[in-house]
């Protein structure tokens, strides 16, 4: 359970209709297997000990008694297992029959949760056999007092974030499922024991319901469905099991299969997300009862997949949609700003690198939508000490292909004079040498914008802002930053997205830009003319930094947890030691450079992570690094 990860399971065993002894044995085998694999929770289908399709056999006392004995047998056989098992059975209480979920742990029945909504339409006729109750009951069962009700939450003593509530099949399909109320009262994990038969397209609807409910509840949702062993007199069951977490799929079985699916749910993420969303409603309903159980607190062996590129969908279709939507958000953000100002011109610096390329493409599209001639885009290339022929030529070709107004202003002489004025040597390639170039470029752009009555379009991206890898009042400043919320790992796919829709000449240039190493080009090139200063050799791989950024800002995860997740996500690409090295650098730079983000120009938010000081990220510029600093007098 370290870092909030808990392994859970949803299972569909082989069953025979009304064969309780057989069904109990199959259920037991799966509980034992899941426990052996480290699962702390397993959920089975609705009425699984008898099978769901028993029909009027549910009116037979013999079947009800056999179900009771089957549950007692499960208790005896699992007494030494550290796993909470949730199984379905018919339960007789005070002369009435209920469709319930039984929670059992280490040989004890912790509680019974009855089904709240009994379908009596189409192929379902549950009201013929079962009853509902909204009362809080204490059932005397096998000589023991056991809580029963729809308002039970089962809580782990050793892990306060593990709080489990239950609904059964149809409960999910109504307009206001009980799980919404459970979530408001603290439940973080929902289990659903289901017997949802299969029909054309029903699996897709079922999947959407689980996805949406887990997202609305900000919870994990375990769905266990009846399988092929059920009667096929009129309907067929497919064993469609799913585990979702806040709307994201963690595991799903194939249709018409039996077995166990596993997932490592992240309780930490659930709690932090609820805390972040101020509209998540909490309640203190006095009807709710918390039932506590013990479980060993041990490290979960992670099998969960962590995408190494959280900003970039790995599915080609999803990636195309992400790029299209992101690009349009950027374009329409700039379009609104330009229409408000009423200016027919803008100025931006074009280096031949990815960021300025994307900014130019966004600007060109915004001009098209405003029906403004593209020659109002004053694109300026400003070669200096580090400019290579490759980036220079790409900048020139791109500007001309776009149809922007081309300006070339060599800033070597101006920077040389400035360095001389402040007593700096041209031979000393320090921060002053680099920043003098960046600030000179910004001055040139600002003054051209003044002269032409336009604004400067900023080109810096989200990853650079996170790392503070921008010259204060240099490339850090503009009148509108179109890339401000776009991470570096997504920038190249956006450029490629536009390239693939462009004519052959522009496409060739854009693809060469994509192949060029990321660099600020502030140091003189190597003797062979290649770029001498590669950003990722200085601050580390952007794919790592974007991973760190996403999980720190979006989820608020601890440094150790991020390192652990990154080690899994980038296994085989980076060693844990390398990841830790760059994570330390990321954290240090992130906290040290908040002052640059505190005075950012406007720019459109495109995703769930933004560092705008007016919106998503309001951090004191003089905060200590919470991941390295502590008050030793107290801790």
Image: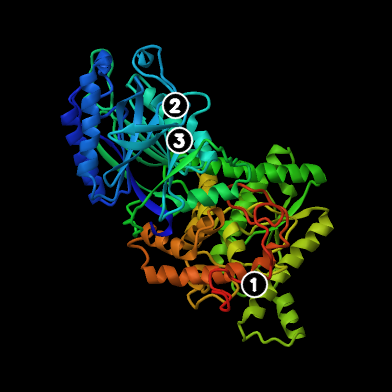
Point out residue 496 in the picture as x, y percentages from the top left corner.
50, 48
What quarter of the picture does the C terminus occupy? bottom right
Count neighbours of disc 1 (C-alpha within 10 A) and say few if under 14, some if 14 to 19, many if 20 or more: many
> Mark 1 — residue?
384
Q: Earlier in the sequence, mark 2 or mark 1?
A: 2
Mark number, residue 211: 3
Please say whether residue 538 is visible from this viewpoint.
yes
* Label 1 vs label 3, nearer the camera: 3
Instruction: Identify the residue at horizontal 23%, vertical 36% (top origin).
Output: 72
Seen at 30% across and 47% down, the residue is 83
Q: Decide which of 334, 313 is in the foreground and name it.
A: 313
Q: Could you tell me which residue is drawn at 55 percent across and 39 percent down?
A: 184
Residue 84 coordinates in the image, percent (x, y):
32, 44
Q: Is residue 467 above or below residue 167?
A: below
Instruction: Compare residues 434 and 554 and report the one nearer the observer.
Output: 554
Any mark on residue 171, and which? 2
2 and 3 marks in contact (CB < 8 Å): no
Q: Quadrant of the N terminus?
A: bottom left
| Count of picture labels | 3
Q: Residues within 10 Å of mark 3 (few under 14, many from 20)?
A: many
- In front: 527, or 80? 80
Disc 2/disc 3 C-alpha distance (Å): 15 Å
Of the two numbered discs 2 and 1 in the rendering, the one whose residue sits closer to the viewer: 2
- Looking at the rendered structure, the secondary structure element under dot 3 is helix
Q: Are marks 1 and 3 in contact (CB under 8 Å)?
A: no
The vertical placement of 91 against 305, above or below, is above
Nearer the camera: disc 2 or disc 3: 2
Above or below, 520 against 288 in this view is below
Q: CA distance from mark 2 to mark 1?
A: 68 Å
Secondary structure at badge 2 equals helix
Residue 13 visible within the image: no
């Amino acid at each position: 359970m370290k870092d909030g990860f808990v392994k859970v399971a949803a299972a569909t065993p082989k069953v025979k209709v009304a064969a309780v002894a057989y069904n109990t044995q199959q259920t037991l085998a799966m509980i034992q297997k899941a426990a052996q694999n480290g699962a702390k929770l397993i959920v089975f289908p609705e009425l699984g000990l008898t099978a769901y399709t028993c029909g009027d056999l549910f009116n037979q006392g013999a079947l009800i008694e056999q179900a009771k004995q089957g549950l007692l047998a499960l208790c005896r056989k699992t007494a030494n297992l550290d796993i909470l098992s949730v199984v379905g059975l018919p339960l007789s209480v005070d002369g009435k029959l209920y469709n319930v979920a039984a929670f059992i742990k280490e040989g004890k029945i912790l509680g019974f949760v009855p089904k709240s909504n009994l379908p009596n339409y189409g192929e379902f006729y549950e009201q013929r056999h079962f009853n509902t109750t909204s009362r809080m009951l204490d059932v005397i069962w096998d000589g023991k007092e056991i809580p029963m009700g729809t308002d039970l939450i089962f809580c782990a003593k050793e892990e306060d974030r593990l709080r489990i509530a239950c609904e059964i099949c149809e409960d999910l399909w109504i307009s206001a499922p009980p799980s919404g109320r459970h979530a408001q009262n603290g439940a973080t994990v929902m289990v659903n024991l289901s017997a949802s038969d299969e029909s054309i397209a029903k699996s897709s609807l079922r999947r959407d319901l689980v996805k949406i409910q887990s997202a609305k509840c900000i919870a994990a949702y375990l769905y266990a469905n009846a399988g092929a062993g059920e009667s096929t007199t009129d309907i067929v069951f497919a064993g469609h099991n799913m585990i979702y977490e806040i709307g994201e799929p963690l595991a799903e079985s194939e249709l018409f299969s039996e077995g166990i699916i596993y997932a490592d749910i992240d309780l930490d993420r659930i709690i932090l997300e609820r805390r972040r969303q101020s509209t998540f409603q909490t309640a203190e309903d006095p009807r709710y009862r918390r039932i506590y159980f013990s479980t060993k607190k041990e490290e979960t062996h992670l099998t969960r997949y962590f995408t190494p590129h959280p900003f970039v969908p790995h599915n080609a279709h999803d990636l195309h949609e992400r790029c299209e939507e992101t690009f349009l958000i950027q374009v329409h953000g700039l379009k609104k700003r330009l229409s408000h100002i009423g200016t027919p011109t803008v100025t931006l610096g074009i280096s031949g690198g990815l960021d300025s390329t994307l900014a130019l493409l966004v600007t060109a599209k915004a001009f098209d939508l405003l029906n403004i001639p593209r020659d109002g885009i004053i694109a300026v290339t400003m070669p200096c000490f580090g400019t290579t022929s490759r980036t220079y030529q790409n900048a020139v070709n791109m500007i001309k292909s776009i149809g922007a107004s081309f300006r070339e202003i060599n800033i070597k002489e101006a920077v040389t004079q400035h360095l001389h004025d402040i007593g700096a040597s041209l031979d000393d390639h320090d921060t002053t040498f680099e920043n003098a170039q960046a600030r000179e470029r910004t001055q040139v752009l600002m003054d051209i914008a003044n002269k032409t009555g336009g604004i400067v379009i900023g080109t810096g991206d989200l990853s650079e802002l996170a790392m503070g890898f921008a010259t204060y009042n240099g490339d850090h400043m503009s009148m509108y930053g179109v890339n401000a919320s776009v991470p570096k790992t997504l920038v190249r796919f956006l450029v490629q997205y536009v390239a693939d829709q462009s004519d052959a000449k522009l496409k060739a240039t854009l693809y060469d830009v994509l192949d060029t190493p990321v660099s600020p080009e502030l140091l003189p090139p190597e003797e062979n003319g290649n770029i001498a200063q590669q950003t990722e050799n200085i601050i580390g791989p952007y794919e790592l930094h974007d991973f760190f950024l996403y999980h720190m800002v979006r989820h608020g995860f601890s440094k150790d947890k991020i390192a652990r997740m990154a080690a899994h996500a980038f296994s085989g690409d980076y060693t844990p030691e390398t990841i830790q090295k760059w994570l330390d650098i990321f954290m240090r730079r992130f906290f040290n450079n908040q002052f640059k983000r505190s005075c950012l120009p406007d720019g459109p938010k495109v995703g769930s992570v933004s560092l705008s000081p007016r919106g998503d990220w309001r951090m004191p510029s003089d905060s200590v690094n919470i991941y390295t600093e502590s008050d030793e007098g107290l801790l």
